[in-house]
Amino acid sequence: MPTTLKDLMNNPKEALLKGHFACAGCGSALAFRHAIGAIADKAVVVIPACCTSVYQGFGRGVAFDVPTINVAFASSDAVAAGIKHAMEKKGKEAHVVAWAGDGGTADIGIATLIGACDRQDNILHIMYSNNVYSNTGGQRSGDTPIGARTTTTPFGNKAQRKMVPFIMMANNASYVATASVAYIPDLVDKVKKAISYDGFKFIEIDASCPVAWKSDSADSIKVARLAVETGVWPLFEWDNKSNKAVLSKRGSKFRNKENRKPIEEWLNIQGRFKGMSDEEIKNLYADVDRQWTFLEKFLE
Amino acid sequence: MPTTLKDLMNNPKEALLKGHFACAGCGSALAFRHAIGAIADKAVVVIPACCTSVYQGFGRGVAFDVPTINVAFASSDAVAAGIKHAMEKKGKEAHVVAWAGDGGTADIGIATLIGACDRQDNILHIMYSNNVYSNTGGQRSGDTPIGARTTTTPFGNKAQRKMVPFIMMANNASYVATASVAYIPDLVDKVKKAISYDGFKFIEIDASCPVAWKSDSADSIKVARLAVETGVWPLFEWDNKSNKAVLSKRGSKFRNKENRKPIEEWLNIQGRFKGMSDEEIKNLYADVDRQWTFLEKFLE
Amino acid sequence: MAEEVVMLTGNHSVSEAVKRVKPDVIAAYPITPQTAIIEYLSKLVDSGEMDSHFIRVESEHSALAAVAGASWAGARTFTATSSQGLLYMGEWVFWTGYARLPVVMAVVNRCLAPGWSIWVDLQDSMAFRDAGWIQIYNKNNQEVFDTTIQSYKIAESKDIALPVMPCLDGFVLSHTSSKVILSDPEEVYNFVGDYSDPIIEIDTGKPFAYGSIVMPDKYNKDRKDLMEAMERAKAKIKAVNKEFSETFGRTYGNGLIEKYGDDDADLTIVGIGTMADETQQAIDMLTSEGLKVNSVRVRTFRPFPTEDIIDIAKKNHKLLVIDRSVSFGHEGHLQMEIESVLKRNSIDTPVIGKVMGLGGEDVPYTRIAKVAKENL
Amino acid sequence: MAEEVVMLTGNHSVSEAVKRVKPDVIAAYPITPQTAIIEYLSKLVDSGEMDSHFIRVESEHSALAAVAGASWAGARTFTATSSQGLLYMGEWVFWTGYARLPVVMAVVNRCLAPGWSIWVDLQDSMAFRDAGWIQIYNKNNQEVFDTTIQSYKIAESKDIALPVMPCLDGFVLSHTSSKVILSDPEEVYNFVGDYSDPIIEIDTGKPFAYGSIVMPDKYNKDRKDLMEAMERAKAKIKAVNKEFSETFGRTYGNGLIEKYGDDDADLTIVGIGTMADETQQAIDMLTSEGLKVNSVRVRTFRPFPTEDIIDIAKKNHKLLVIDRSVSFGHEGHLQMEIESVLKRNSIDTPVIGKVMGLGGEDVPYTRIAKVAKENL
Amino acid sequence: MTEKEPSMPILYPIEGAAGLTGDWRTQRPIVDPEKCKMCNICWQYCPDLAITAANKDENKVIVFDYTYCKGCGICASECPFGAIHMEKEVD
Amino acid sequence: MTEKEPSMPILYPIEGAAGLTGDWRTQRPIVDPEKCKMCNICWQYCPDLAITAANKDENKVIVFDYTYCKGCGICASECPFGAIHMEKEVD
Amino acid sequence: MIELLQISRGGSGGVTGAKILAEAAMYEGLDSQAIPKYGAERRGAKVEAYVRFDTSPIRIHSPVYNPTHAMVLDSSLIKSLEIDKVSKDGIIMINSSHIPDFLKGTNRKVAYVDATSISKELGLVVSGFTLTNVTMLGCFAKATGIIKIENIEKAIEKTLGAKIAPKNIEAARRAYEKTKVEIA
Amino acid sequence: MIELLQISRGGSGGVTGAKILAEAAMYEGLDSQAIPKYGAERRGAKVEAYVRFDTSPIRIHSPVYNPTHAMVLDSSLIKSLEIDKVSKDGIIMINSSHIPDFLKGTNRKVAYVDATSISKELGLVVSGFTLTNVTMLGCFAKATGIIKIENIEKAIEKTLGAKIAPKNIEAARRAYEKTKVEIA
Ligand SMILES: Cc1ncc(C[n+]2csc(CCOP(=O)(O)OP(=O)(O)O)c2C)c(N)n1
Ligand SMILES: Cc1ncc(C[n+]2csc(CCOP(=O)(O)OP(=O)(O)O)c2C)c(N)n1
Ligand code: SF4
Ligand code: SF4
Ligand code: SF4
Ligand code: SF4
Ligand code: SF4
Ligand code: SF4
Ligand SMILES: [Mg+2]
Ligand SMILES: [Mg+2]
């Protein structure tokens, strides 16, 4: 039974408390609220350096109502694995989640990620992607889309976008999914489904960052929805039992290019793409096509 | 024109000199001889900690007739990228090759590998796999096959084999190939083809290690050939322009399971698989199937 | 199973000790010359002889991270590394120290690259002398076994709560076999005690956040406590050494230093690791020649045995400090710290420093004796 | 383009210096508070204002690895980092030092976690004082600019061939704007010289292997030369400081230390970084109260300015050493090394040590003055 | 020093960990009770948990918690019925 | 100290970097000139470059370089014509 | 030495304003410093910055604890100003059309100007935020007299560049003219 | 103190042999050490190991430079033995059916036994390598008299375990019996 808004409202425990330190309109905080909220009673979160280390609040107390361990940047999955093994050894139940940004997942943290996946450590890695290093001021990450102006690519990023979910499929994770802050019940479904799998699970969430995306904070949902509707962000699930990918209900119609909105709609409400040349836009379209071509191989 | 034995013999320069420190029957040394030999006049090799750091010889001189930089374990591609950028800046031609073992590629080195791939640094990474950490005495690596007895899995490795070539496809390398010491001209072809591509190139070579595999040194070629003939080691090429995989001529018939030899033939001439249970053998077959299923998605 | 007397390498001695303390979680990554430690533990775990979880991590950074994670979850833990591996986990070495996690990590000392060398010097562990770890350097395989056991008792006591690094010279101890008395497993376990009341323990029922942003005042409070815990650790290490001796009949000086020969010597040779053990042979030789010499082995470099060094310097006439590690751009590590202690306490005893044995260079006792004579 | 006088942060001062020396290859990874350095350089490179290759690596380990690779290939290089980033590249910090590669890396000092803090102390760079790097600590943004330039001239001279780490206090310098004279680019470039005759250069026509296994004798030969290069570096740093002063009219003490006030003081406050700059304010205040005090700023911690410390200690009556970093289990870094120098040279001048300002704790000159008075 | 437990950087969950974040607001959401269909879409999307859900059964529309609402405007953008609008905060 | 160039761990290419590795051999390959078809498969597979290639034009069979041949036996295994066999080294 | 405490909201350009002010001081022949309060900045949240001015070189690196003057870029933040820490002889500068109640009866010298209106008039608005950072520099020049408005203008020009500078200069100048100084 | 230099080929079990010998010494009531020469070992390449024996605790950690005795497990390696470094009073033990030419006329005490044949007879062959490491321990016991053959057997038993030990014990014993000691 897919999660409904009602289910969300009946969730007995919130993982995120009011009065946290995220910017207004932060997609990551919203994602945390629901993704961790869905498993709040038994969740332990491990957080490498990223915006989440900061927005949990500081000094007086924290806004996370689940055990939270802040760790060195390149090590969330190793720490999570250590915690999980220790708790298993001690006979304690827990959903240990490595909650990391795109930088902490796709770049500096990818060896730990792949290492834990390779061992099939029984943990869930949630990568919330704001496509840059937001916490340090918006530098390019491996997950930055082509054309995005970041503080280290002031004239537009040229490098292809790294698709960590594909890498995790190639690495035979037990469950891989993509999600978006625009589709909360779908996100919650995927988290719940993930923890039902043994072994290593991976979810990437497209999580708007009005600061880095130079978008209106009020548009945080809109921009994430457009990523799906333009085909920039395919919503799917894959597991290693079937080795098949399935498009999520809300995103399935965008498999057909004709149903997709022009990527420009997504670009235009974000300041980070201001000044993109036609060439860059062409390259971005091509990179999105490349991602779909790859994904297509795994779709029925 | 595919490389012939004659072409190999006409190669003007050897990369490997006589009197090196590899064990008798070392597949890695043989692979180095031909792979680097194929580009010896312009090759620069970067070598992280692995058997190759040792077998180049020590004290009096080295057995490598190409510039060789030995570097920290988790950094071959970053160093190679640095060298390549410097030489480009200085207007010098070179084929910069990160030559690393499976440990230095698939485990500790995978963040550097993926990082360089992500940036499409114009280098070639050659991973020679002996499926373990040979240099330190044969501990399990991410590339260890199911069932193999290693010094850290004395009762048989349980974890799935990590297929780095698939990860590199998912990561959109410009060119990806697998090769084997049993098929030298094919290997040389692939190296030559790789350097014709711009951006990041990746080749994995199945390189026998009589020490770790507990096989007769005289069987180093036989065992590698059996890996191909049993389907354990698919020989293929892939590039990101086509996003298609092509089986190599010598290995194409093993796509059809009926043409494959039983995996037991490969197992039985190696001491490392001694004492494998039926269950383990079943799991190994399943893991090989999983790899083919993944690869199939990219084959015509 | 009772006490056993066996011929054992240093690496095996570590493993046998670890087996007896029954860690919940082990994570490690291979590196020469540490590998045998973890190979043996893998085997014990996989065969069911040890009831621990062994995480075969993909790097040292992850090894210590995993072990730290387990420690946060209230587990008893173990890891081991060496040289480049220690550097590669450097961020976590500091992290673990600052976090006050009672992790025990054996460091098999090996020098650093480049050039590439797998032999001993102490440059690797010395590079982490700031990191908030207790460091205990050993002289032989028996001590390696005993120190590994003691490390848990020290690390896990609440008033200390510091990670401990038992250090053993690569190859010289790690690969050399010599006689080791393996104490009865049950007695060892009883000596260390279980870890059922952990320093810290993650509990889904009682959420807390560890390591969020802190303001300078809190930051300084934590660091001050770390400094003080190090100070307290001196007494603790001595006490554990004493209790160990009472239980098992083996003792290592006062726990912090080990003296050899009579006080009031014309020359006291101060050293660390196996070179300090070999120095005793030199002392015997020199004494037999009628010279008034003695020696001191610094067993714990962190906390630094300030009071003992003062005592030694007061009771003798000249110190010859032999270092197997150096801070490039200044001097040997032991030398600098001993000099600073003497200066701080206005002690006039002269100090001569020598750096020897880098990169696995062998320093036989005859050479030590020669240097001693040159400096008498 | 000629000299410009601008209002600049410390980070921008680094970048402006780097721009002028025209490195061939830059590789870096962002970390607070270093980010602005590399953001600005990215921009200059992407806009074509700088003709360098900028490698956007995926970690600090790779940043220094890439830069080292480029240096082996004979390129002039630059990188920058801070705190956890420095630890994460720790293996390469030693590697670069031991390999004698003339890399310049700006370190924006920030304390280490946990607790998580982005503010200044010197624990990060001090952790690498053994690694074979020259370390120069700066007092203000002008010096940051000037030191970065000088670093290349020092690093790239063949008789030195050591990497250099210009260090600047995080936020206090990195993010604070103050007046900086940006010297004429061409003059700066001429001062540093080009790097056409590199220390080492990969050449496909002349193969060699770097960093293979070495025997202890060769290993020790290399380390001895490293030790001696550090010794030579003292004279070199002084000479470069002098030449710089002749060319640009700005000078920093004798290059190794900077004295303030008259000799023969009752108390000399020795410090490092911006705290040592602020100390001068305290000295003025105390002097105006009629007290005989002066101060010394240690500019290069590696090589350690042994001779200058001797000189200071001889000419004054008591030293108060203020550290912004500490070795847990012993004492503050400056304190220990100064004490060891005095002991080694039998100088009686008393030394008092204070560790202050960890974790970004602000230490105003009034507090320094207070501590000074307490110890007069 | 007799302290027994080590001093560690540990914090506990509290509301308002980062203070009363309503202070950051430069515009505030206002709900039009007439228009609100109590669908709770806005509740779902608020990153700051600053909306008390509407309750159809009790016929209660949503309520904002201005102590913490940062005024991002997501709720206003996402309300399918245009029941929320943003107003500039006045000093 | 007047040395100008820094002391670095650099080695240069030489034959026999690891010594005369023929010493390691416990068995040696012997070619049967009658059987050798000069196909050079053995040459291709020798990890030790210890085989001088055969030359059909000059009708020269392969020659082993026993100074370096480690006696792995690959050549014997891989010769398609059974032209090589291994013999125990005698002391 | 003169020390200024500047209070603003994240996103309103306070740090840039402080830097421009320090630069203007440089043109005035003073030594100066602009120090952002170090920490994570959040749009809308309170942010402090400090500026020091002296006739001789500044060797102090601390944040400012007891400012000579205080400047508040957003009148809603005035309540967070700890008035007692500001020098009795100093001036409290505020972006407001009037003296806020909070200051009334404090007997402090207050300079006020409706910088928000001026900035709005000139279109100095970025993502919904009215930028008053530069505008208020005019108020500073007028109220303190430490720096000539010409030097403020020069610093604006240098920092913001030919494209954006003119509007900002105009804003500072208008504020300069409209600033009122009274004892509250 | 008695020091032994043992020369063997990589892969022939020299290190294990040295360890068993040290263990046997322990049973004899001696303190002992077995030191493998540290480095990368290659099958077939020459490998050294050292064993020390003493009646009091050994505190020396160096490799052995001037051995009391030398033992060569593979007769083809005899040429690499630097005889001058071996004590004049020491014994050179060699796996050979005769005194090799190399030693003839050196006037050294030589112990020899054809360990290879004994090992082969007993099937002590692993991947083509005849293991003479344990066999030669019998030669050591006989030639030096330092350690009783019973203690060697006990050490073999302990180290190799019940399954493989018997053959090895038999090999050592046969070697013990067949060893001849002569002046070369
Ligand atoms: C080893 C190390 N390098 C760099 C940093 C600095 N750093 C902290 S957070 C961060 C960026 C995180 O980016 P991401 O993972 O995408 O999370 P986000 O900030 O975007 O939420 C960086 C570079 C660090 N803390 N540690
Ligand atoms: C940081 C670090 N960790 C561990 C090591 C030890 N080490 C050296 S080589 C090696 C194994 C290499 O394995 P692989 O890459 O597969 O190459 P192989 O030895 O099999 O040729 C290891 C673990 C090291 N040198 N550095
Ligand atoms: S910078 Fe972006 S990701 Fe970080 S807290 Fe702000 S909105 Fe969220
Ligand atoms: S151990 Fe294996 S890979 Fe290493 S040199 Fe020997 S045969 Fe080659
Ligand atoms: S989204 Fe609109 S209609 Fe739905 S509950 Fe909120 S205010 Fe009411
Ligand atoms: S404006 Fe933003 S923070 Fe406020 S209630 Fe609406 S969604 Fe929540
Ligand atoms: S493989 Fe056989 S036939 Fe071919 S060249 Fe060699 S020996 Fe001759
Ligand atoms: S035995 Fe091995 S090393 Fe010797 S020639 Fe044949 S293949 Fe080469
Ligand atoms: Mg991010
Ligand atoms: Mg390998």
Image: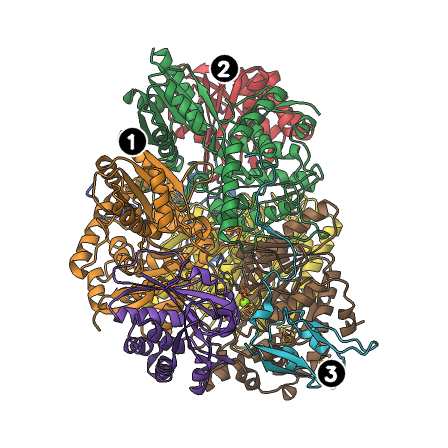
Chain colours: A brown, B yellow, C green, D orange, E cyan, F blue, G purple, H red
Measure the alpha-carbon separation of dots 3 and 1. 83 Å
Depth check: E46 or A257 in front? E46
Q: Nearer the viewer, mark 2 or mark 1?
A: 1
Q: Residue at x 37, y 84 (%)?
A: G167
D331 to C218, vertically: above or below: above
Classify mark 3 as within 8 Å of ligand 5 or not, answering yes or no.
Answer: no
Task: Determine the chain carrying the residue at label 2.
Answer: H
**Residue tagged by mark 1?**
D344
In which quadrant of the rendered image does the N terminus of chain D lie?
A: bottom left
Which secondary structure, mark 3?
A: loop
Residue E33 tag number = 3
Q: Nearer the viewer, residue E39 or F55?
A: E39
Residue C118 in percent (x, y) is at 44, 40
- For the point 51% across and 51% down, which residue is it? D113
| Chain for disc number 1 | D
- Choose mark 2 or mark 3, whichever is in front: 3
The CA distance from mark 2 to mark 3 is 95 Å
Q: Amino acid at mark 1?
A: Arg
Q: Quadrant of residue G182?
A: bottom left
